[in-house]
Image (tube, helix red, strand yellow):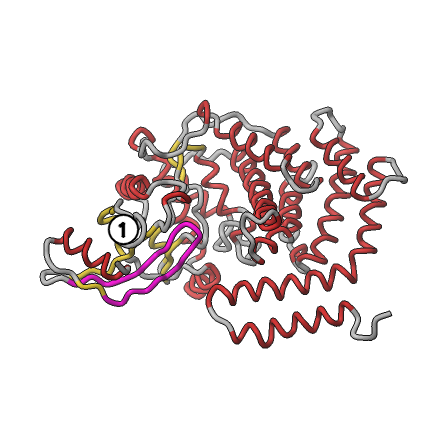
Amino acid sequence: MQYRPTTTELLSDVAALLENEVLDAVTGPLQHRVRVAANLVRVVERELLLAPTLAEEERYRLALVLNDFDADLADLRTRLAARLDDPEPLGAPWTRAIYDALRATARDDLAIAKPGYEAWTGE
Amino acid sequence: MNTADGLAAWLSAEWGEPVTIGGLDQSSAGARRTNVLFEARGASRSARLAATIVPSAEIQILDVASEAEVRDVAERGGVPVPHVHGVCLDPDVVGGPFFVSDRVDGETIPRRVLRLVAQGGVGARVAAQIGQALARLHAVDPRTAPVALPRPPGARPIDHALDLVHTAVAGLLQPEPAFSYGLRWLREHRPSEPVALTIVHSDVRNGNLIVGPEGLRAILDWEGARIGDPMEDVAWPCTRMWRFGEDASTVGGFAGIEPYRAGYESAGGTWDEERFRWWRVLETLRWGTGLAGQAAAHLDGRFRSIVMAGSGRRVPELAYDLLSLTRPA
């Protein structure tokens, strides 16, 4: 087992270095790339903390929508996308259930990718 | 020849007198365009100008002569654009074909634009002015458009856009059910094709505007001009990507839709609510697939860049926006 810092602690340190020291030391287009890189390190940090729980919740939501509790998440996502691509009507209740599941997933994905983006609930 | 010497030589020939170039400032360098601001001084006159240079002819969407021509056509129709003085197709003068236009002062950086507009309390005016400018562009007879402008096959912009975005969704690196949901919505809500096609700019939004404390001064970046549905132009600045955090102000973070629509209609535009809503969804999904495409270009080595990599992780933003626009009744 590795000694401390943990993975997420290390990522936080790398992000802080990029944000607090490297960003001030560079200019022009490189500054933009450093800002993007720092943000991506933060994304990965949140992903390591949140993704296992959120992925299981997404799997469960899609299992309910597709009535299949044995398939893994990637398989469920592929099947749902294929069903949505199929022009066969879904009916209003099923459409609503799919929509609600996708919206919940979109909110969870944003908790990793861009926290706060989901605060705006209008169009 | 460097840029200053090249511009001096070209302008000397244009003006018929020796011209010197000063205050050269490369204002922006995109992937396809470099914009250079400068002052030209001759014996009889001087001018503050901007050169738009295409570094490589291979990556241009629209050739510079046609871009200059569509700006002229738009200007004659009453759209605020920096006046074009001339086009040079010789790639050796400044390292690529270019055109020279008036340099319009003002703010172009989106967040600074929003700050300036908020300070002056002119958000509703800017939204109305954008609406008016679009209506004037859409009122131009499309038969006067440059022949090089892309046109949708069969004069069916709705079908064409849907086909393209369908292909893009099918080509995603992994299924994105929210995008499939959006695509399904677009199919089920497909409006009828517009009765009349017009010139569309295709990228009128905060970032391609020059704004002063009193309001809109000019619309930039005409390389995406084509023939299309006027409502695709009207919908574009209303997508969330171009509000820069000012989400409650639907039109580019400037204001709500009312003054924008009033401006569009007051200048003779015909607002179609059904197509307006449809294009907002289409354009949001198209932007989402575009971000996914950037990530793919990074991953397969066509364009390695941390920024392109980061685009892949922006897909959830567009998935969320898409769902916000397509709630079931």
Q: Position of residue B212 (x, y in %)?
A: 36, 61
Q: Name the side, left or right, on which A14 lies relative to B269.
A: right
Residue B156 sits above or below residue B298 on the image: above
* Residue corresponding to mark 1: B92
Q: Residue at x 46, y 63 (%)?
A: B118
In this view, the residue in front, B1 or A98, is B1
The residue sitting at the top extreme is: B154
Q: For mark 1, does the 10 Å Cα neighbourhood hold few (<14), some (14 to 19), or many (20 or more) residues?
A: few
Q: Name the side, left or right, on which A12 lies relative to A62.
A: left
Q: How many marks?
A: 1
Q: Can residue B223 be seen in the rendering of this structure?
A: yes
Amino acid type, label 1: Asp
The residue sitting at the right extreme is: A70
User: Which quadrant holds residue B27?
Assistant: bottom left
Residue B262 sits above or below residue A6 on the image: above
Instruction: Read off the magenta span.
Output: B22-41
Q: Position of residue A37 (x, y in %)?
A: 61, 63
Q: Secondary structure at mark 1?
A: loop
Q: Position of residue B50 (x, y in %)?
A: 29, 56
Q: Main secondary structure of the magenta part?
A: strand
User: Which quadrant holds residue A83?
Assistant: top right
Indicate the chain on which mark 1 is placed: B
> Is residue B52 inside the magenta stretch?
no
Q: Can residue A123 be seen in the rendering of this structure?
A: no
Q: Residue at x 90, y 40 (%)?
A: A70
Q: Residue at x 66, y 48 (%)?
A: B320
The N terminus of chain A appears in which quarter of the rendering?
bottom right
Residue B115 sits above or below residue B175 on the image: below
